[in-house]
């Protein structure tokens, strides 16, 4: 079956929209090379699926990030995405973490920050507590708080795959809670195995075989990291040259790493001189 796709669908006889996401290669690329504990792998998989589902609701060209923070053994987990379904993510933790550790034991007293950044327009940020048992429930609380629209979210992840489903009342003038509740009950029955092994069409048929469902063309999801040697050079230029020269004198080079993809960028004395020779108002990312 084809993985790493997001599917949108509508119900012809209900003012409710749905989405289904299946991830494999992009998920593996996010967790590769980080030696994450199993529980963090699963968390990032669910977070990737959630970010993809939320990105599909954007009405603009731009970025979205879902960031989890807390005072537990996991201090940070974040997935960044955009309207092109390009995702990347990272997590930071300390100590040993049980494979079956749940959300609150991972983050302790924590919160979730969802940031929407349009290419044109004002940035929006919403915050909710990580006070539910699952990431899905925390996200549903976010929608209840920010949009007052009934929303159902299902998220799954194992060592190889991640998947999710999203159901939400369309923002219309009428009250369609009864329609939503009926479809929400059906969506609740979806199993991890179904989302991991079946094509999207088959999943929707199993869940909603008595409904009239319109499935749209899928959108491909990819892992995409925006780091580059040019961006690293720009970061170096924000530091006083004397400090950089001191590091070069001591270590012979400047080494910068990307948390998202583990790329390494190395600058020697000649590179540094070239960096600081650029006019201050030049954009080295071009």
Image (cartoon, grey):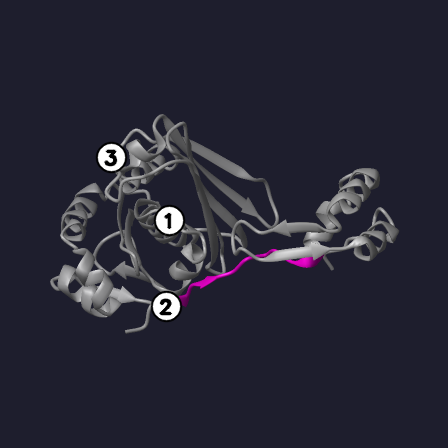
Q: Is residue 20 visible?
A: no
Identify the residue position indicated by label 3 in the image: 133
Q: Which residue is mark 2?
A: 218
**Within the image, what quadrant is residue 171 found in?**
top left
Q: Residue at x 24, y 70 (%)?
A: 199
Residue drawn at 29 percent across, 57 percent down:
159
> Counting residues from the N terminus, which is met first, the one under dot 2 or under dot 3?
3
Density class for disc 3 (Cα within 10 Å; few <14, some 14-19, many ≥20) is: few
**Residue occupying the point 16% across, 56% down:** 191
Residue 60 left/right relative to 170: right
The answer to whether 251 appears left or right of 101 in the picture is right
Please name whichever residue, 53 or 79, is drawn nearer the observer in this view of the structure. Answer: 79
**Foreground disc of the pair 3, 1:** 1
On the image, the x and y values in percent for residue 203 come to 19, 64
Q: Is residue 167 visible?
A: yes
Name the mark on residue 247.
none
The span picked out in magenta is 219-230
Instruction: Give the CA separation, mark 2 to mark 1.
Output: 22 Å
Q: Secondary structure at mark 1?
A: helix
Which one is in front, 123 or 248?
248
Q: Residue at x 30, y 40 (%)?
A: 135
User: Mark 3 or 1 closer to N-term?
Assistant: 1
Q: Disc 3 versus disc 1: distance between alpha carbons?
A: 16 Å
Vertical comparison of 283 with 108: above or below = below
Q: Which residue is mark 1?
A: 44
């Amino acid at each position: 079956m084809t993985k790493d796709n997001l599917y949108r669908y509508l119900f012809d006889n209900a003012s409710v929209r749905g989405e289904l996401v299946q991830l494999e290669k992009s998920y593996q690329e996010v967790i590769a090379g980080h030696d994450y504990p199993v529980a963090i792998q699963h968390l990032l998989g669910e977070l990737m699926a959630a970010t993809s589902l939320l990105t599909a609701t954007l009405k603009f060209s731009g970025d979205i990030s879902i960031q989890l923070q807390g005072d537990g053994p996991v201090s940070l987990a974040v997935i960044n995405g955009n309207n092109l379904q390009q995702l990347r993510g990272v997590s930071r933790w300390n100590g040993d973490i049980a494979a079956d550790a749940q959300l609150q034991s991972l983050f302790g007293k924590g919160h979730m920050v969802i940031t929407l950044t349009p290419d044109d327009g004002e940035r929006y940020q919403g915050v909710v507590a990580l006070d539910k048992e699952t990431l899905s429930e925390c996200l549903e609380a976010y929608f209840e708080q920010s949009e007052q629209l009934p929303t159902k979210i299902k998220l799954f992840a194992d060592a190889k795959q991640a998947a999710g489903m999203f159901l939400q009342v369309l923002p219309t003038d009428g009250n369609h809670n009864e329609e939503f509740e009926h479809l929400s009950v059906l969506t609740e029955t979806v199993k991890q195995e179904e989302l991991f092994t079946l094509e999207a069409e088959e999943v929707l048929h199993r869940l909603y075989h008595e409904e009239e469902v319109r499935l749209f063309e899928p959108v491909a999801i990819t892992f995409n990291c925006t780091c580059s040697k040019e961006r690293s050079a720009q970061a170096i230029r924000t530091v006083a040259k004397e400090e950089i020269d001191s590091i070069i004198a001591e270590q012979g080079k400047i080494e910068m790493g990307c948390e998202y993809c583990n790329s390494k960028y190395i600058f020697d004395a000649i590179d540094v001189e070239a960096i600081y020779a650029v006019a201050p108002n030049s954009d080295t990312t071009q």
